[in-house]
Image: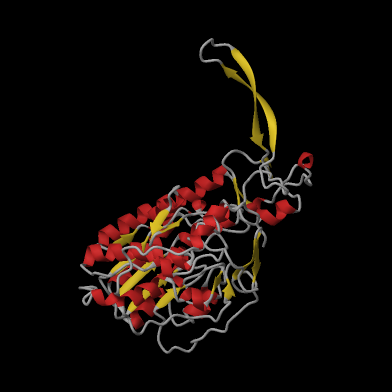
Amino acid sequence: MRALVRLQAGLLLLAGTACLGESDVPLDAFPDRTGSLDLSRPLAIGDGYLAGVQDGALFESGQEVSIPALLAGLAGTKDFVQPLVADPGFGIQGEQGGRLALVQFAPPVIERQPRGGPPLQPDLPRPYNNLGVPGALAFEALATRSSATSTTGNTFYDLVLRNRGTFAEEAAVLDPTFILLWLGTTDVLGYAAGGGDPALAPGLPTSPATFEAVLGPLLDQLVQLTDDVAVFNVPDVTLFPFLHAVPPIVIDPLTGEPKTITIFEQVIDPVTGDTLVVQRQVPVPLIGPDGPLGPGDLVTMEAGPLTEEGIGVPIEQDGLGLPLPDRVVLDVGEQFVARDAVVGYNLALERLTAARGLALVDAHALVQDLTRTEGILSDGVRLGDEWLTGQAFGLDGASFTAKGYGLLTNRLVDALNGRTGSRLPHVRTASLPGVPLLEPAEP
């Protein structure tokens, strides 16, 4: 996969030395840091965002900085076991191969490494502490225990659940003292990543009514095991970099600047009331399935190599004049569908967690904070939503980096400290890896 973006040289300073923030606190400063919170047997249930997916794959060095693993480290949990996969791991979403790697950074060139593995502890005689399943969909959560019972044939269930039971059944075997739950993001991400094409994402996004009908009974089963359950809500995936790394306009391959055309339009003079004809320069939109893309339409990162071949570029702009396929275009209407699903999921989660007195962690607000101009200042370093340079999202533009998972873990820590009286410190995001900018990754 190749994607061209303009890199601002000043942003490379993000890779420099970071100042230490308030999270730079030794663990021994908190001798009773868990308070009434018992993290001796933690359990995570969810999709790839709890599994620790990075750069389009599940792999050991990424799993070791997953949210549940970071939390276990803060609490000093000694027996926290995950279904680790040797680097470069297993690609997700049907991709052949392992994790993505940055092999050239100016201009950026991204390639997928060969498939890694094997699983490092497949015969653990008890459930893993991290039951995050890449690609898991919320509507599968009550009944799925293997690829054979997954509606999508998701083989990651075989790696994580190992046909030993459903999420709730394996949770009961582990008898957890704390449960972390995060489902729903994949249900809308799959829709957006496929450009809203129903052939690529049948049945997605899951309806909010179905989401609530599944999450409610699942939470009821989990709270019978422990009162300490925390739930992440669902971020707006239309803000993720995979929909913003490639602009929906024609870019001059030589200058990196948008190509423009002159348009004439009529305006009313506010003083005289006369009708005037003015001209202005506007960027040339790419060609989508239904003609030139409209204002607000977005394209996925898959559009990058297509536009380099001239697909989606008008003939007048030295392109082929062929439209981009629907799978790489998320138009304004499709974005509304995705955002409406997210709103519905989060309203349902507010009701479900409030009724059961559970902690709700606002991942949605964190992603919105990353999109602000100032981003999030963490340990003296700005983290933002920009692809590559923002450092919070990985090379696929859809998963988080270790730094991004650190931010999410800190939001979880704040929620737990506020509810349980625990004194867990923040993760030091400055010490966690982001996207390598000054050196290309190993091929």
Quarter of the image with the N terminus is bottom right
- Give residue 431's position: percent from left, percent from top: 42, 70
Q: How many marks?
A: 0
Residue 37 in which image quadrant: bottom left
- Give residue 224's position: percent from left, percent from top: 27, 73
Q: Viewer-proximal residue, 235 or 275?
A: 275
**Residue under the point 40% across and 71% down:** 45
Residue 385 appears left or right of 301: left
State whether residue 412 appears in this view: yes
- Give residue 185's position: percent from left, percent from top: 46, 60
Q: Viewer-proximal residue, 425 or 165?
A: 425
Quarter of the image with the C terminus is bottom right
Q: How is the image coloured?
A: secondary structure
Residue 163 appears left or right of 80: right
**Residue under the point 43% across and 66% down:** 405
Task: Say if 28 sits above or below 239 in the image.
Answer: below
Q: Viewer-proximal residue, 65 or 90?
A: 65
- Give residue 13's position: percent from left, percent from top: 51, 58
State whether residue 38 appears in this view: no
